[in-house]
Image: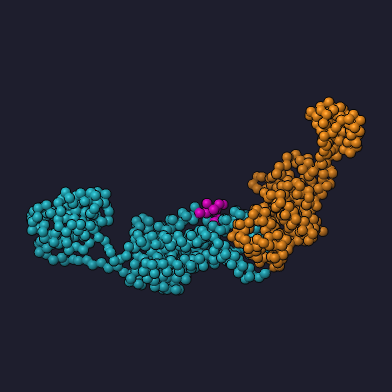
């Protein structure tokens, strides 16, 4: 029987096995979808309703200054007043304690003593809301001071965010592409569990007693996993685009290159893990550690810049960083093949892949179960 | 010319010698059984013959073929059912056969194999849903999908119920009818005795003895154990024992209450005389049995180890 027929049979057999294994569908399709949906709901939040802080104002001794300040405070859009009118300081403090409001602002008691007091709950002191309110209030007081001496500010700042290709890049796009990268990577990292299982059950030995070409079998398995990767990309993209309004700008060439590079690298890493593992548990442990580490250090869920400085070098050596970047290049920035950093990333990934594969096959050989002759 | 010839095989793992010196040859068309206690080196020997391990020393010849020069040809002419079964659980019976068939340049039609292993009705069942006996039959089926001339069956009946075991015996006998050569290992003496043309007993990495089951049993002492149980109490048994001891063929006796055990080299002659005596005296014999020597006795005699299954 010729090689192509053998390959075709091996391929269809492995497709059938994949389709019949419920675990495969759970971990490769269902789980990433759930994870992505959760992250989108929690952190996406829609760009429409931005930050809001619930506050109350106390005006112990109303005077012209306090009246003016109150009028100005009402203009700040992010402040949501629990009560339109000032409340007593005691009442406001109680609300803060009960966490009914994020902060209580106490207006100056006289026209001269222009000190505003901000009262926040101790528990929330370091929280984002308290920090933001204090920042806003600080700015507000600066403005008030400038106005009081009749000066106009010399320096001002405006802020805009930019992205290289598409200017409508949102967290949804970012997360969607990160999740796609992560799922494809995990498909490879965990997929090689088959090898461990086959070895444990004597199937490896069994196949070696036949003239079957083991290389073809491995290749067929790889192709099956790449197909699963394509299914992952399609399903996650559909949910991201239609469920959460992510917008994709696809560069097919970059996408295909990054996808194949990723497929090879993470399969090779899975192969390396399988060479070390006598049991499925051992393999799963290794794959989990690798996947967890990379999940949080490769900019899947949040941009790398949010990580502390000292962690940055670590992120720069992980293959998932470049794979996720590559996926983003291919799916949302519509760039990639033209940029040098894309190719450097692919190069680093390939290095991981080649090293993993070579070490893996050496370990298999050294263990000599594979090297009967 | 033998289909398989094994000469002075030797294999050790680290400091432990698994196989010290094993030689035998297997003739075409025979069922050749290797038995031995656990750790005797059976599996290592088989794996070396099957090409999974390379021997430290010694030769393995399949006719004119050897692993070092003709591994592809050997793989085509042998079929192996490993102890672990080693099946694709998520594929159906027929899909397993089809997949294995593509590994070989020529193969036997799946339908024919299904018929031989009596799994035609289960052909579309996934392997994980099969019973132990059915799985084992499929493993044997996979071993013959390439229509091999030499088939290795490594403990094909271990853990099966008597009916399932008998089904597998039928398959082995069918293979023999087809002129195939089978190399079998087993834990069951009855099986070895029933199926084998020749039995090779291995212990501590060496061949202890090798012959047909009948010849092996014959080679044991000619003594047979005879048991008599008397209906007329201890006194009758004591008197019968005295008479028995007078017979020249009786080696020794043993008596417990009214039942008597005696070892004799001529059981028929001894019994003839004893019955003459009991008839004269009017003693009634309640039970009588002559224990046949079996392969199990051979095993114990050669290895000094109890057989357990």
For the N terminus of chain A, the image quarter is bottom right
In this picture, is B228 found above or below A113? above
Q: Which stretch did the figure color magenta?
A: A274-284
Residue B299 placed where, x, y %?
77, 43
In this picture, is B229 found above or below A83? above
Residue A274 placed where, x, y %?
54, 56
**In this image, B200 relative to B244: left or right?**
left
The image quadrant of residue A203 is: bottom right
**In this image, A121 relative to B131: left or right?**
left
The image quadrant of residue B37 is: top right
Query: Is residue B107 visible in the rendered structure shown here?
Result: no
Residue A100 placed where, x, y %?
24, 53
* Residue A55 drawn in magenta: no
Residue B227 placed where, x, y %?
82, 35
Query: Is residue A263 visible in the rendered structure shown here?
Result: yes
**In this image, B128 relative to A172: left or right?**
right
Residue shown at the point (81%, 39%) measured from the top left? B291
The image quadrant of residue A323 is: bottom left
* Residue A282 drawn in magenta: yes
For the C terminus of chain A, the image quarter is bottom right
Chain identifier for the cyan-coloured part of the image: A
User: What secondary structure prevails in the magenta region?
Assistant: helix
Closer to us: A290 or A316:
A290
Q: Colour of chain B?
A: orange
Residue shown at the point (48%, 68%) measured from the top left? A230
């Amino acid at each position: 029987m010729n090689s192509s027929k053998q390959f075709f049979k091996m391929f269809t057999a492995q497709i059938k096995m994949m389709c019949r294994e419920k675990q495969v569908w759970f971990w490769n399709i269902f789980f990433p979808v759930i994870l992505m949906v959760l992250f989108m709901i929690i952190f996406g939040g829609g760009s429409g309703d931005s930050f809001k802080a619930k506050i109350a104002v106390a005006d112990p001794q109303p005077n012209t200054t306090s009246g003016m300040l109150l009028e100005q405070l009402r203009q700040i859009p992010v402040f949501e007043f629990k009560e339109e009118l000032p409340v007593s300081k005691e009442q406001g403090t109680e609300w803060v304690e009960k966490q009914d409001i994020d902060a209580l602002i106490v207006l100056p008691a006289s026209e001269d003593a222009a000190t505003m007091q901000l009262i926040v709950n101790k528990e929330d002191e370091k929280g984002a809301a308290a920090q933001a309110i204090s920042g806003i209030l600080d700015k507000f007081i600066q403005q008030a001071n400038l106005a009081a001496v009749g000066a106009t500010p010399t320096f001002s700042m405006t802020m805009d965010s930019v992205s290289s290709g598409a200017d409508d890049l949102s967290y949804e796009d970012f997360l969607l592409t990160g999740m796609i990268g992560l799922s494809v990577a995990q498909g490879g990292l965990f997929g090689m569990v088959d090898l461990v299982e086959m070895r444990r059950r004597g199937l490896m030995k069994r196949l070696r007693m036949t003239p079957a070409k083991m290389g073809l079998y491995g290749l067929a398995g790889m192709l099956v996993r790449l197909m699963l990767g394509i299914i992952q990309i399609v399903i996650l993209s559909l949910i991201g685009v239609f469920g959460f309004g992510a917008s994709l700008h696809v560069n097919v060439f970059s996408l295909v290159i990054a996808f194949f590079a990723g497929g090879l690298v993470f399969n090779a890493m899975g192969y390396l893990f399988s060479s070390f593992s006598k049991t499925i548990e051992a393999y799963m442990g290794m794959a989990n550690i690798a996947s967890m580490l990379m999940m949080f250090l490769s900019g899947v869920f949040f941009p790398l810049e949010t990580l502390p400085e000292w962690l940055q070098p670590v992120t720069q050596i992980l293959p998932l960083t470049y794979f996720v970047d590559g996926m983003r290049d291919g799916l949302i920035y519509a760039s990639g093949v033209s940029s040098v950093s894309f190719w450097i990333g692919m190069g680093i990934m390939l290095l991981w892949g080649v090293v993993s594969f070579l070490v893996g096959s050496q370990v298999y050989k050294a263990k000599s179960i594979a090297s009967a002759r | 010319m033998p289909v398989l010839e094994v000469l002075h095989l030797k294999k050790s793992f680290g400091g432990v010698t698994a196989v010290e010196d094993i030689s035998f040859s297997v003739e075409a068309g025979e069922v050749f059984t290797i038995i031995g206690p656990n750790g005797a080196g059976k599996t290592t020997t088989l794996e070396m013959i099957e090409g999974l391990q390379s021997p430290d020393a010694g030769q393995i010849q399949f006719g004119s073929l050897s692993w070092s020069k003709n591994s592809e040809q050997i793989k085509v002419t042998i079929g192996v059912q490993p102890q672990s079964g080693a099946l694709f659980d998520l594929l159906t019976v027929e899909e397993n056969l089809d997949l294995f068939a593509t590994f070989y340049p020529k193969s036997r039609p799946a339908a024919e194999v299904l018929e031989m292993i009596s799994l035609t009705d289960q052909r579309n069942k996934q392997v994980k849903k099969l019973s132990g006996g059915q799985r084992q039959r499929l493993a044997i089926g996979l071993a013959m999908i390439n229509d091999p001339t030499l088939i290795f069956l490594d403990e094909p009946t271990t853990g099966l119920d008597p009916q399932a075991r008998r089904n597998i015996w039928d398959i082995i006998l069918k293979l023999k009818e087809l002129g195939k050569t089978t190399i079998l290992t087993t834990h069951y003496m009855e099986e070895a005795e029933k199926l084998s043309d020749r039995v090779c007993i291995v212990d501590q990495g060496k061949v202890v003895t090798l012959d047909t089951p009948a010849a092996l049993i014959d080679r044991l002492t000619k003594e047979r154990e005879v048991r008599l149980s008397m209906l007329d109490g201890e006194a009758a048994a004591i008197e019968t024992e005295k008479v028995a001891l007078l017979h020249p063929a009786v080696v020794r006796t043993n008596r417990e209450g009214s039942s008597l055990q005696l070892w004799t080299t001529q059981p028929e002659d001894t019994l003839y005389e004893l019955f003459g005596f009991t008839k004269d005296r009017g003693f009634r014999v309640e039970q009588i049995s002559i224990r046949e020597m079996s392969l199990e006795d051979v095993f114990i005699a050669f290895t000094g180890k109890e057989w357990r299954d």
